[in-house]
Amino acid sequence: MSSSLSSSLCCASFFSVSSFTSRRVKRNDICNGGKNEGKFSRQDTSVQHQRRRRRMTMKARSSAETPTETETEQKANQSNKFIPAHMRKTVSRITEAQMKTNGVELSKAATQVQESIAGFLAFEFLRARVKNVPTLKVLNVDPPILTAPMFLSEKECEDIERAMFGIDGGDKEESESGSEVVGQQKKVNGLSSMKKAELVQCCEERGLDASGTVAVLRDRLKEFNTNANDDDSNEKAPSPSSRSDESRSANTGGDPFRTSNPDALVNASSRPEAVNQLLKRLNYLFPDCVEEFESPSARKENKLWGIEVVAEAYKSSENLRASHAAFEQHEAIEKHYQIRANCTFFLNESSDENGGGEITFPALPGLSVKPEKGMALITFPSTAASLLDPRAATARNAHDNGANTTLNSIEVLVRGATPKILTEEEAAVERKLRHEEEKERARLLAIPRSERRKMSNGEDKPKNSRKKSQD
């Protein structure tokens, strides 16, 4: 009995040991691919551990060297971040092939190009109708520079030049009719001895109203002489746009003649028809522009836009340094308006073979505009937020060929009112009104839609209502 029990115990222990070893062998074979033939080695596990640690170390190094996804996204967002025009330091130029043709003519460009240029100007600078204006060309994209050859005809240029500068275009010499050119305007002498026919002729030559009696005509010409003397002695207050003339006179021996809003071009009853046509075309190009020569202000009703006409007879022995047509932010706030567009119209061109008087752009090296008779040059010195764009600064090359000739032009400055700046009391009132409007809106939103419809006195009836009104 005891022998059988001992034999059974031995068999049980043998089977348990054999089953344990078999499980261990199978486990070792599975882990090592059956290469160790059932032998479990601590050395193999240590090698695998070292390899695993090495892989983890290499992975950590690579992750430290390469930026994470969040850093890459942040850099991408920074590169795609919108920068306003007055803060941009980059420029967008046209190709060299397009420069050889003096710009891209928008009337012949693709519709997508026209829409992109129009949208860009409306969003960042000033709304303009650039699609249907003939001969309008893009000379630079950002900052935008536009040119329009033959914007004025030769006759229109001569009429404006005659009305502003006299027949001789600003030369200081005696004429046969006994008149004298003073301060770039033609002064009439001997009015008391002139007959009506002579007075009418003098008024027509200067673009003045030639209707009326002899006394009226003499008074009109006397007023014209007074304005000419005032311009010659610089008794007129300088215009805001010509504040850079002081810096110009510092560089040159003589200040180029400039006058703001001359009566010969501003007075609707006496200005030539060429000026009226010019303003009509300009109003078509800039729909927001109005024919008002008063300074706009957001504090006045219907005074958000205005224009200023500046006549210039340019002659300088040295290059003029860069200047801005727009104001700095604090100046624009004080004046309640900003120069949004500067439109220069050349009335004549240089007779010198070497040229001269070209308008240059310091931010765009190699780009210059040569004066051509009847051509328009349009720049945008400030943004839609009434902030000065430093890239739109302009300079001018010297023009002095020894002869008593000048480069005559007129500038039309489009002035837009700056945003209204509220005082502390006005700001408090605005905040209170806005808070009350928000409260009222929240109260209406809390009311069910059906109740709101009833409150509207039956104006907004339910669309899907099947109930018919009973008589």
Image (spheres, helix red, strand yellow):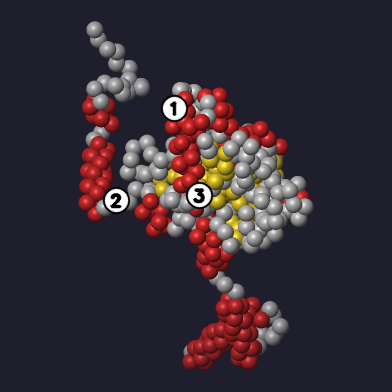
Q: Earlier in the sequence, mark 2 or mark 1?
A: 1
Q: Which mark is residue 216?
A: 1
Q: Which mark is residue 232?
A: 3
Task: Give SS at disc 2.
Answer: loop
- The residue under the point 70% across, 56% down is 402
What's the amino acid at mark 3?
A: Asp
Q: Earlier in the sequence, mark 3 or mark 1?
A: 1
Residue 189, image x, y percentages: 53, 38
Tag 3 near tag 2, CB within 8 Å: no
Residue 24, image x, y percentages: 59, 83
Name above or below for residue 10 compared with residue 278: below
Tag 2 near tag 1, CB within 8 Å: no
Asked if residue 51 lies left or right of residue 216, the reply is right
Asked whether the viewer can see residue 385, the reply is no
Name above or below for residue 254 compared with residue 295: below
Q: Which residue is identified by label 2?
A: 422
